[in-house]
Image: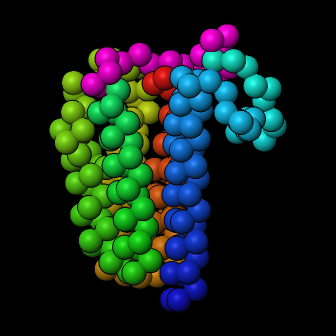
Amino acid sequence: MKSVRLWTTIAAVAAVALVSIMIKTRTVDAQQAQTGPAATQPMDHMHGMMRAEVPAAMSPASDDPRQLVPLPAPMQEHMLASMRDHLQTLNTVIGDVADTKFDVASKLLEERLGMSSLPLHHAAEMAPYFPQPMQDAGTNMHHAASRLAIALQNASVTQTFDSMREVDAALHEVTSACVGCHAAYRLR
């Protein structure tokens, strides 16, 4: 049982680290585009290569292949706050899983990230500003989070290797939705 818990914790921490790095990198890239080039060259995270520095006036994130989703400033700030909340929720859930608090993790996940969380994030008000594929990606992520909440409930009843594999697979589905959306779209 300890090896299952260790494996689950390692996989979950790796997933959160990946999402955290992607969000932080995109925030830094956006800030650099607004304030000019930094002292060091940014990494091209898709290929691991260095990009040449380009003055911000020449290229305000034009080298970013992701689709720009223009939002009014207050909505943009709300969206970024929601993304940080999603990341914090995943981090807390992973900690709860590591502590075998599956029911606590399931409840938090459904309230903050699952389908039940849509009113909390004002999804109905935000969705019309998003391209349809982005709306679909968001809906898929919220469905995946609800499925993870169910997998966590199942794991709380029977803590087996198979139930933990289901938790890992469901967590991977959530983080894959996050990674896919962040790789395709940007706000700035």
Residue at x-position 47% and y-position 58%: 171
User: Left or right: 86 with respect to 124?
Assistant: right
The answer to whether residue 125 is above or below residue 112 is above
Q: Nearer the viewer, residue 176 or 77?
A: 77
Number of callouts:
0
The answer to whether residue 161 is above or below residue 130 is below
User: Left or right: 172 with respect to 56?
Assistant: left
The answer to whether residue 188 is above or below residue 178 is above
> Furthest-top residue in view?
58
> Where does residue 75 sit, x and y in percent of width and height?
29, 25
Residue at x-position 50% and y-position 18%: 68
> Furthest-front residue in view?
39
- Report the predominant secondary structure element of the magenta stretch: loop
Residue stretch in magenta: 57-75
> Where does residue 87 sit, x and y in percent of width and height?
41, 52
Q: Is 64 part of what is drawn in magenta? A: yes
> Furthest-left residue in view?
119
User: Left or right: 78 with respect to 70?
Assistant: left
Residue 151 visible in the current orientation: no
